[in-house]
Structures are given as structure tokens and as C-alpha cells.
Image (tube, rainbow, N blue to C red):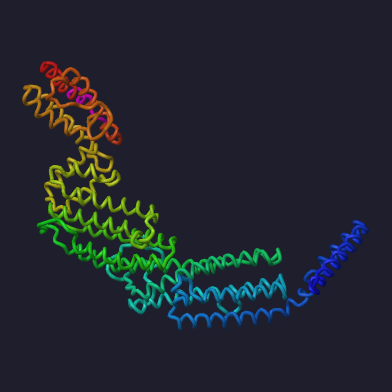
């Protein structure tokens, strides 16, 4: 047995004998003596440090000065390193100043917990990490330094004295992004710095949250509710959000050139549709340039957030540019449809371009949004390609249900360059086919006149079977019979088919009076259709039924 082993065994037996002795004494104590002993022990706990709490403010002030000095040293090192991590080549994304600052804070906390106090002095020291009389907060100062570096990027390359208004998280496409006031030209080096500031802000927010939890756990219970780092966490959240916004605005600034090119194309002079237009190649070039770099600089969560905000801003501006195009010819509409489809593919492949080595990369929410919104733009362009006589049918077939209104139809007509007279005719046709919604329905008297006119047409058509067939085809096309346009109900066959004669009378009468019921429901706010109108309509269609019976 060595000397060290013998020493360890001796120390073990001494501790064991001491514990046994204390246990024997405790067993002999009465309940009253045991309570008094525990009270004396509790009273003695931190009794010495509490006696010096007033004088410990000098200790807190000294810790504050050291922290401030350490922060200034860390920020100077960041300036010397051009705000790039020293280990950037091995994948480190957080700036060194953040790690050094929190290492220094942890050392101060450990020293206070072990050697000074867990009471008011620890609370005062945590307040130094937040604020102190006459001084800025240490963590808030770090957040301000990060934001000032971000402002330098905007000021130096864009001439702004502040971040654009849209940088405060409002890059979802709601503001009218017109002109160039929101433009941010972001060189590759500044793009890297912005990504490093983003990751540093996220790291500081998470570490600050953990720091507050650790202080609450170690401080005395009566002081735990006073430890609150929420304002500092919000400061870092604001920095990270601003970084994402700067990146989004930087990409959309480069894409803005493509939208200007798109608006300058003479879409009525397109002779041979085929390959992608110049503006599509410009969008593709930007994606190939920035997507791989951003994929390396950002983590998946930040990149996903970037993609969502970028798509919401760009697709909104792209759709507005398409809507403002005028006089689109048939070939121009075909070329524009090809270009829009290419832009949709480019946007959906943006995450894959950022992570080319990960074929299973999943950005389903982003992809779904791009396909939905760009699909609506593509459908609008397809409606423009339709001939005037098929425009309303194509409009109601391709446009989303919430956009099948006359306002959108007018917009499509203006893009197509339809004359005013033809536009009014198309609007009237759309009103009839859509069943006359409450916002665009004419007055009740006009509806009654229209139904009377329809009944007169049916009555006069009964004079000859040949004339009836042509008139009935036109008449049937103006009503939503069951089975038409995908509606539920019995499918109406061709009037020229003899086999439909026996059942036509019942089906036709049921369809017409069902239609009259829907008209009455849509005009409840005005006078109902008179009994004379219904009787005249019934008489005309009774003659139609008799003609079908004679035809077979």
C-alpha cells in the first residue's frame, strides 16, 4: 500500500467516525433541542455577508468597470477582424465578442456565488449585466454595437442615414414597394457580415435567457422575481430581425432590375414565343449567385425564415408588375405564361440551390406558398390568352373562387386591351353566368324584365321546331341548369337527341323554376317577381314540352 492510499483510507475512516458521532448526538437530542439547533444554523447562514451588504456596493462597481472595459476590448477586436469570426473557415458563425463577453459574465457570477453573497449583492451584480445608475446596460450595449455595424452596411453602400422603414420586419409585401428608397445594395462581404451579426444576436438571446434562469435558481427566493432580462432579449431579437430584413431587401434590390426589364417589354409585339425572356435569366442569375452562399452562412431555421419573407415580398411585387402590363397580344400572353412558369420553378428551386448536397431538404411551407401564389399569376396570364368569346368561360374556370368578381375581370380586360364596348358585354355575360351576386346584381325590375323577355323568346320559339332548336341552345347557355359548369343535379342532354324527348318536359320545368327560386333568393332585399311573370314563363315552357312530345 502506498502512502497516498493509506492517507485516503485514514481520511475516510476519520470522516466516517465524525459522522457517526454527530448521529449519536442528534439521536440523544430532544425535538425542542433539534429545532433550536436548526434555527441557529439558519440564522448563521449568510450572516457575515449580510453584515457587509452596504460596503459590497464597491465590489459591484468594480465588477461593472471591468465588464465595461472588457466589452470595449472585445468590440475593438471585432473591428480589427472586420467583424468576422476568427474560426470562420471551420464553420464558426458567431462573432468572438459574444463568447468572450459571456465568459467574463460567468466568471463574475461564479466569484460572487462562491465568495461574496447570494442575496442583494448578487441581485446588484445581475443588474450590472442589465443596467447601472448612469451607465448603459452591458448586454444592451453589445446589441447596440451590433445594430450600429448593420447600419454601417446600409449607410456606406446605399447613402441611407438609417435602416429603411421596411427593415422593421415589414418585408411581407404589404407596403407599396415603389421607387428605390427601400433598395439596399449588399456586396458579398457585407452579406457575410450581416449573417454573422444575425447568428451572434441569436446566440446572445439564447445565452441571455439561460443566464437569467441560472441567476433565478441561485439567488435567494425573495429576490428571484426581480431578475428579468426580457428587454435585453428583445434587443437581440430586433437585431436578428433587422439582419433578415436587410438580406431580404438586398436580394429583392437585385431582382428589381428584372422587374424593370419585364415592364419595358412590348408584349403586343412578340413574334415568336419560346425561350425565357431576359428578365427571367436575370432572376436565375441572382439565385445562382446568392443561394449557395446563404446556404453556407445561415442555419436551416434562419434560411427558412429568409425564404418565406423573400418570397412574400418578391411575388407580391412580381404580381403587381404583371397586372400593370397593357395590350398583351395572344403571342405575348403565351410568352408571358412561359416566363411566369420559369420564375415559379426558379423560386421553388431556391432552397435546393442553397443546399445542393442535401436532396431531401424540406421547405414544404415555402414551396406551397410559391406554387399557390405564382399559380394564381400564371392562371391570370392564361385567362389573358383566351379569345374574347371564350374569355368569361376561361376566367371562371381558372381564376380562384374568391377572385371571380367583376373587378378582376375588368383588370384582365385592361391587360388584354379589350375595347369598352366588348368589356361591357363580357361583364354582362359574367354577371349572368355567375348567377348575379349581391355586389353586382342589377335591380329587381331589371331582373323581372329579363325573365319576361326570356319567356317571350320561349313562346315565340314554339312556332317552329327548327327555329326552336337554335333558340333553345342559346337560351340554355344563359342559365345555370343542373349539370352545367360542374353543378350537381341531372345532366341535360343535347336537345337534338331524340331519346331525351320524353323526359325533357319535367326536367326543363324543374330546372327553370329552380332557377327562378335562386333569382328570388338573390333579390330578397327588393320586390319579388310577380305572379304574372311566373305564369308567362310557365306557359312558354309548357309549349316547349309539347313540342318535344311531338318531336318523338
292 up-or-down from 502: above or below: below
Residue sticking out furthest to the front: 1
Q: Check residue 269 for magenta coloring.
A: no
Horizontal relation, residue 489 to residue 358: left or right: left
Figure quadrant of residue 498: top left
Horizontal relation, residue 445 to residue 463: left or right: right
- Identify the residue shown where x is 62% and y is 64%: 213
> In this picture, which residue range is highlighted in magenta?
527-536
Q: Quadrant of the C terminus?
A: top left
What secondary structure prevails in the magenta region? helix
Q: Check residue 528 for magenta coloring.
A: yes
Q: Nearer the viewer, residue 516 or 139?
A: 139
- Identify the residue shown where x is 30% and y is 65%: 288
For residue 176, say whether it is visible.
Answer: yes
Figure quadrant of residue 157: bottom left
Q: Nearer the viewer, residue 275 or 128?
A: 275
Q: Nearer the viewer, residue 416 or 478?
A: 416
Q: Nearer the viewer, residue 345 or 530?
A: 345
Residue 135 at x, y percent in the picture: 57, 79
- Identify the residue shown where x is 31% and y is 70%: 183
Residue 230 at x, y percent in the picture: 56, 65
Q: Quadrant of the N terminus?
A: bottom right
Figure quadrant of residue 60: bottom right
17 up-or-down from 475: above or below: below
Residue 480 at x, y percent in the picture: 22, 32
Residue 320 at x, y percent in the picture: 26, 58
Horizontal relation, residue 322 to residue 331: left or right: right
For residue 173, say whether it is visible.
Answer: no
Query: How many numbered circles are shown?
Result: 0
- Identify the residue shown where x is 20% and y is 62%: 262
Amino acid at each position: 500500500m502506498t502512502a497516498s492510499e493509506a492517507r485516503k483510507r485514514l481520511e475516510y475512516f476519520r470522516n466516517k467516525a465524525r459522522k457517526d458521532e454527530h448521529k449519536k448526538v442528534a439521536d440523544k437530542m430532544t425535538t425542542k433541542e433539534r429545532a433550536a439547533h436548526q434555527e441557529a444554523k439558519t440564522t448563521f447562514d449568510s450572516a457575515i455577508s449580510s453584515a457587509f451588504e452596504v460596503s459590497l456596493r464597491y465590489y459591484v462597481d468594480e465588477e461593472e468597470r471591468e465588464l465595461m472595459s472588457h466589452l470595449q476590448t472585445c468590440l475593438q477586436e471585432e473591428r480589427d477582424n472586420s467583424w468576422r469570426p476568427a474560426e470562420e473557415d471551420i464553420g464558426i458563425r458567431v462573432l468572438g465578442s459574444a463568447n468572450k463577453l459571456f465568459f467574463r459574465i460567468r466568471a463574475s457570477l461564479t466569484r460572487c456565488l462562491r465568495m461574496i453573497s447570494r442575496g442583494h449583492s448578487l441581485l446588484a451584480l445581475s443588474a450590472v449585466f442589465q443596467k447601472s445608475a448612469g451607465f448603459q446596460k452591458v448586454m444592451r450595449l453589445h446589441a447596440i454595437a451590433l445594430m450600429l455595424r448593420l447600419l454601417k452596411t446600409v449607410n456606406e453602400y446605399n447613402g441611407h442615414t438609417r435602416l429603411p422603414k421596411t427593415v422593421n420586419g415589414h418585408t411581407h409585401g404589404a407596403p407599396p414597394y415603389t421607387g428605390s428608397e427601400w433598395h439596399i445594395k449588399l456586396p458579398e462581404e457585407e452579406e457575410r457580415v450581416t449573417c454573422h451579426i444575425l447568428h451572434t444576436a441569436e446566440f446572445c438571446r439564447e445565452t441571455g435567457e439561460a443566464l437569467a434562469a441560472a441567476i433565478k435558481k441561485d439567488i435567494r427566493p425573495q429576490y428571484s422575481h426581480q431578475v428579468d432580462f426580457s428587454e435585453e432579449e428583445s434587443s437581440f431579437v430586433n437585431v436578428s430581425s433587422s439582419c433578415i430584413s436587410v438580406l431580404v431587401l438586398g436580394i429583392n434590390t437585385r431582382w428589381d432590375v428584372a422587374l424593370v426589364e419585364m415592364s419595358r417589354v412590348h408584349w403586343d409585339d412578340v413574334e415568336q414565343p419560346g425561350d425565357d425572356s431576359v428578365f427571367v435569366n436575370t432572376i436565375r442569375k441572382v439565385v445562382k449567385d446568392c443561394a449557395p452562399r446563404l446556404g453556407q452562412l445561415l442555419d436551416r431555421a434562419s434560411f427558412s425564415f429568409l425564404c418565406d419573407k423573400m418570397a412574400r415580398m418578391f411575388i407580391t411585387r412580381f404580381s403587381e408588375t404583371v397586372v400593370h402590363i397593357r395590350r398583351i397580344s395572344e403571342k405575348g400572353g403565351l410568352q408571358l405564361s412561359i416566363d411566369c412558369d420559369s420564375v415559379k420553378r426558379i423560386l421553388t428551386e431556391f432552397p435546393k440551390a442553397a443546399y445542393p448536397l442535401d436532396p431531401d431538404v424540406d421547405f414544404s411551407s415555402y414551396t406551397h406558398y410559391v406554387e399557390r401564389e405564382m399559380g394564381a399569376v400564371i392562371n391570370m396570364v392564361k385567362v389573358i390568352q383566351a379569345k374574347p368569346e371564350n374569355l368569361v368561360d376561361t376566367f371562371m374556370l381558372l381564376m380562384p373562387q374568391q377572385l371571380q368578381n367583376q373587378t378582376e375581370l375588368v383588370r384582365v380586360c385592361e391587360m388584354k386591351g379589350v375595347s369598352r364596348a366588348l368589356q361591357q358585354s363580357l361583364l354582362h355575360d359574367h354577371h349572368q353566368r355567375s348567377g348575379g351576386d349581391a355586389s353586382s346584381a342589377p335591380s329587381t325590375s331589371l331582373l323581372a324584365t329579363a325573365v319576361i323577355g326570356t319567356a317571350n323568346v320561349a313562346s315565340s320559339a314554339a312556332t317552329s321546331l327548327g327555329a326552336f332548336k337554335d333558340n333553345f341552345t342559346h337560351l340554355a347557355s344563359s342559365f345555370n341548369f343542373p349539370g352545367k359548369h360542374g353543378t350537381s343535379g341531372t345532366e341535360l342532354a343535347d336537345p337534338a337527341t331524340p331519346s331525351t324527348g320524353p323526359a325533357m318536359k319535367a326536367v326543363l320545368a324543374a330546372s327553370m323554376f329552380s332557377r327562378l327560386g335562386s333569382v328570388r333568393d338573390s333579390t330578397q332585399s327588393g320586390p319579388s317577381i310577380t305572379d304574372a311573370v311566373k305564369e308567362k314563363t310557365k306557359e312558354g315552357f309548357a309549349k316547349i314540352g309539347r313540342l318535344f312530345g311531338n318531336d318523338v
